Image (cartoon, grey):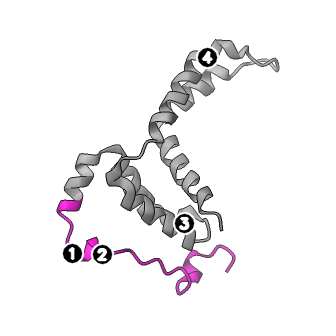
């Protein structure tokens, strides 16, 4: 399996979450009531804002490397189904959005919570497999 595609999926989920308003502004600019498409130059500023937001969202804080790896491992073991990894993905998004709050969260964690996560989708396949 290509884990690079999982990394792109995880980053794109976070980037869309962070840049949702810019995406909507750009799409609103592009919409027209006629079948003739708008001149792309009319939406250049909105497109630049959107690209800038995505560029900023792709930067990962070093503190967020551990939750990112947890999401990546979970998605890998879930055969690419990110919906099985909502909790881990949300933890990565929370870390990316506010690193200080996530650092406080880690400092208040117990030793049991700090242990490495175990993803066992094989034993619980009936709960996670859409084909069963």
| Count of numbered circles on the image | 4
In the picture of the structure, the residue carrying the numbered disc 3 is 75
Is 97 a magenta residue? Answer: no
How far apart marks 1 and 4 lie (CA) works out to: 51 Å
Magenta-tinted stretch = 106-132
Q: Decide: is 59 above or below 95.
A: above
Q: Is tag 4's residue or tag 2's residue first in the polypeptide sequence?
A: 4
Secondary element at tag 1: helix
Which residue is the site of mark 1?
111
64 sits left or right of 129 in the view: left
Outermost residue to the bottom: 123
Do callouts 2 and 1 mark residues in contact (Cβ within 8 Å)? Answer: yes
| Element under disc 3 | helix
**Residue position for label 2:** 115
Specify whether 98 is left or right of 117: left
Q: Is residue 118 magenta?
A: yes
Quadrant in which the C terminus is drawn: bottom right
């Amino acid at each position: 399996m290509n884990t690079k595609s999982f990394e792109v999926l995880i980053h794109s989920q976070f980037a869309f979450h962070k840049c949702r308003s810019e995406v909507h502004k750009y799409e609103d600019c592009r919409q027209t009531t006629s079948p003739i498409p708008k001149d792309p130059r009319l939406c250049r500023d909105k497109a630049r804002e959107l690209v800038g937001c995505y560029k900023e969202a792709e930067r990962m804080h070093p503190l967020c490397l551990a939750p990112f790896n947890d999401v990546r491992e979970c998605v890998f073991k879930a055969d690419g189904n990110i919906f099985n990894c909502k909790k881990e993905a949300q933890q990565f998004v929370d870390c990316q959005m506010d690193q200080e709050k996530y650092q406080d969260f880690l400092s208040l964690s117990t030793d049991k919570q700090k242990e490495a996560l175990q993803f066992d989708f094989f034993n619980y396949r009936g709960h996670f497999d859409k084909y069963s």
